[in-house]
Each structure stands twice: as C-alpha cells, then as structure tokens.
Image (tube, grey):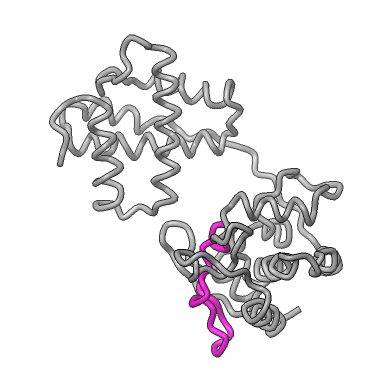
Amino acid sequence: MIPNSDRLSDHLHYFFTAYLPQHRGVSLHTRLSYKHTFVQLLRYWKRRFPASPDPRLDQFSVPMLLDFLTHLEKELGNTASTRNTRLAALKSFFKMVALLESRYENLCRQILLIPLKRSPRWPFDCLDKDEVDTIFASVKTQSRDGYRDLCILRTLYNTGARASELCTLRVTDLDFYQRRVLLQGKGNKSRTVPLWDSTLAFLHTYLKSERRVPKFSHRDFLFINQRGTHLTAPDSTHYVSIIWPTPAPRRRRSNIKDFTQCIFGATPPPATSCRLASISP
C-alpha cells in the first residue's frame, strides 16, 4: 500500500516491499545492497539527531546527504566507488518519493543532481598461462574438498564467471551434450558460455564421485561446502585466499574477491567471455 504519511520508515517499507521488486523488478542482490545503504544512513542520522529516530522526508536535504557521503569515506573508509553505490540507492529512493509525493518534487530533484565522484581506475595485472597452471597444480586434490576447489578454479578460468555467478550455479545449468553452462548474472541477467573438454571432464568426475552430499534444500546447487549448503561469496574468497595466500609482486589488490579478475584482468563482458571460452588452452 502506498504510504500515507511523510515518515521515512513508511516510505522505506513500500520501497523495499513493493516499489523495487514489483514495479522495477530489481534483483535480490541489489535490494540487499540498497538495504545496507539505508542501515548506514539511519545509524548516521541517529548519531546526529538522537531525539528524532524516525525522520520525516522534509528533514533531508542535499547538504545533509553530502555530509553522510563524506562520513562514509572519511570515517568508515569507503572508496569512491562504494560511495557512488550508496548514492545510487539514495537516488533510487528519492525518485520513488518524487513519483508518489508531488510536494517533495523540488527536494528530490535537487538530490538527484548530486554528482557521482570520480575515482581512479587502475588496470588489473593478469596471469599468464604458466602462472595459471601453477595455481591449478598447487591445489591439494587429496583433501576432502580439494577436487571441488580445483573444479571451482577451472570453471572460473573457463567461463569468466563472477563469484556470485559461481555460488548460484546449479547442476541443471550444466549442459554436457551442448558443452556449455548457463550463468545467472547480476540484475537477473543470464548468459550461456561454452565449456572446454577439460573443464567438462573435471566437472563430470566431480559430480560422479567427489561432490559432498548436500542438504535437501541445497541439492540443486553444483558446488557444496562443508555445511552441506551451496557456496557463498565469503566461501569463494576464503578458498582463493588459501590456494593463493600471498599476492605476487605488482598485484594491485591483496584481498582477492574474484579469481576471474586475477586471470583475465577483469571480468570479461558476455561476448568476450564466449570468445575466450571457445578457445581451449
């Protein structure tokens, strides 16, 4: 139901339960990111205005939101890129407010004019074929989940998948006959990527004899962790940090979230990913 008050809490409830999922079709990952933005905003608000825990919409202003964005960078250590992500969530919310509440149209228009902050974009250093082979050879396949870890790395190398795409990969997404895999990406977008014969062979062996027995509710997922559930993004980061604990010289990032970025330099766009995957090493 469209809110009939000017309280932030009422509009946030409508924003997350109706506007984003029903009217915009926003993915769950995006909604969770937006939720985190407003959790931080409310914490900041309560620290500045403890006497008013549930603010009205007219209590927000461009200077106040600029102060909040500065707080994210200066006190919480957010990068300019993360700051821009938080700003995108705020703009999406106030676009909705402008649509529903005409009396706040001028305020919302001013907020939507807040500019994104430019941030330096450094090129990723990538691995050559010998370095990739060295990483594959370093995996201890004799351990309980070693063969799974090797399959994870080979799948990432073959497909150029993001960590989130890997974690949500299901057994039914694999097509051994057509030699391809369906990846469900950000924003509910999907793409099909060819698989090399070597990748298919490793995945076939993994499914046949090396896959952990999953819990019933997680039986459809391809990669299973020690808890019997599907992988999560922290799981993938942890596995990569174990296999490659110390970044080599000239690596720009010491905390590697996406193994694909280390190999290709960046996650390739769908067309590039297909071209790379069609060329077996």
Quarter in which the C terminus is drawn = bottom right
Q: Is residue 22 left or right of residue 220?
A: left
Please give the name of the residue rendered at 54% of the width and 78% of the height, measured from the top-left corner. 174
Q: Which picture quadrant has residue 199?
A: bottom right
Choose between 151 and 72: the one closer to the eye. Answer: 151
Q: What residue do we see at 51% from left, 71% from top? A: 170
Q: Position of residue 179 (x, y in %)?
A: 58, 85
Indicate left or right for 80 with 141 as reference: left
Q: Residue furthest bottom?
A: 177
- Vertical comparison of 238 with 51: above or below: below
Which residue is situated farthest in the left direction here? 4
Residue 278: image quadrant is bottom right
Query: Is 204 left or right of 141, judged from the image as shown?
Result: left
Q: Viewer-proximal residue, 88 or 185?
A: 185
Q: Which quadrant is home to the N terminus? A: top left
On the image, the x and y values in percent for residue 92 come to 34, 40
Q: Is residue 59 left or right of residue 210?
A: left
Instruction: Tell me how many marks there are.
Output: 0
Residue 65 x %, y %: 41, 23
- Is residue 237 highlighted in magenta? no
Looking at the image, residue 66 lies above or below residue 12: above
Q: Is residue 177 magenta?
A: yes
Residue found at x 31% / y 13%: 52
Residue at 44% x, 14% y: name it.
47
Across and down, in percent, residue 172 comes to 49, 77
Q: Tell me where the magenta segment starts and ends, as one range.
A: 164-182
Q: Is residue 106 above or below residue 233?
A: above
User: Residue lying farthest top?
Assistant: 51
